[in-house]
Image (cartoon, helix red, strand yellow):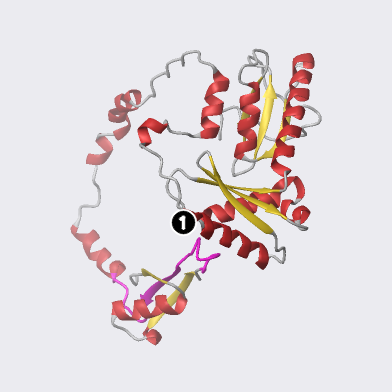
Amino acid sequence: MAKEQDFYGSNVADAIVNACKELAAAQEDLIIDVLETGSPGIFGLCRKRARIRVSRKGQPKPAAESVRPEAEAAVPPAEPAPAKTPPKKKERPLREQKKPAPKPQPEKVERQKEVVASESKEVPAEELGPYVPPTAEALEAVRQDVAKLLELMSCPSSVTVELENQTVVCKVSGEHQDILTGQEGRTLDSLQYLLRKMTTRLLPDRTKLAIEVGDYRERRIEELKKRVLELAAQVREDGMTQAIPALNPSERREVHMLLQDDKEVRSRSVGEGLFKKVLIYKPGKKKPFSRKGGKGQQNDGPAEN
């Protein structure tokens, strides 16, 4: 069978040039399969290289079948040796050794505080050394990037940038606040995620970036806390697990912190991706979904951030 090799490039044409150069062959002498066409990404981020699989045309296949009859003629027709030593008997002790040891029972700890720590993922400041704040030039560059992005979205707005507790807060105001916020703040969260990727090169380590449109996030947190307290009271009354869907990491952390000292109810995150569901439930019982929560797969494993 002809030997195949994979080659990469910024695009398919570049990958083919690399293959021809490496194999010292013309393109018409090669069999080329395009596996990935590549992607330039967004704002230079998340680029993907093109990938092709190449083999030479007309390469003779090894004549394995023509040699086989002669080889079989030279070998005795029966080989009883392997049959006399069944491998299964020898493997039985190994299988017994490979049995996983029973896991020790974990010590009882305050579950809710573990959840809060998993959401924040913060490392103690003393282990990281002194914090170096961004320069005034870096803050101005961030402000210009935010203003330019909003202009490209046809939503020109006034942008101010301030440093608050190691977080660069970009405050946006203007007539396009409803558009920039979006339903349930999804557009705002997406903008924040994109700008964090864009401004990584401008901001020093341990510096976060947040975007606030008007006072949306402040109002959103207050409404979320009120809803959490109402659901927690309902769980205490009927024992049915309640769910709050599609919360971003900072919102989930607010929920866990609000309930971390509650001795009757707990909260935990389930799901994958940036937006996850938070369950509010009574500890020590199964966690079924309430009628309002709808049907879905329950995640009873460790809390996810």
Q: Position of residue 273 (x, y in %)?
A: 59, 44
198 or 83: nearer the eye? 198
Q: Position of residue 70 (x, y in %)?
A: 22, 65
Q: Is residue 125 left or right of residue 165?
A: left
Tell me what residue is drawn at x 60 percent, y 59 percent: 146
Q: Position of residue 274 (x, y in %)?
A: 60, 44
Q: Is residue 206 above or below residue 98?
A: below
Q: Is residue 298 above or below residue 53?
A: above
Give the amino acid type for the residue marked by disc 1 in the picture.
Answer: Leu
Q: Is residue 302 visible?
A: no
Q: Magenta segment range?
A: 39-63
At mark 1, the secondary structure is loop
Q: Which residue is mark 1?
A: 202
Tell me what residue is drawn at x 28 percent, y 38 percent: 83
255 or 132: nearer the eye? 132
223 or 147: nearer the eye? 147
Q: Report the residue that reaches farthest toward the front.
A: 136
Q: Position of residue 34 (x, y in %)?
A: 48, 72
Res 9 → quadrant: bottom left
Q: Is residue 267 left or right of residue 113?
A: right
Q: Is residue 118 visible?
A: yes
> Quick check: is 52 in the magenta stretch?
yes
> Quick check: is 55 in the magenta stretch?
yes
Q: Magenta: predominant secondary structure element?
A: loop
Tell me what residue is drawn at x 39 percent, y 84 percent: 27
Q: Report the residue that reaches farthest toward the left.
A: 74
Q: Is residue 249 above or below residue 234?
A: below
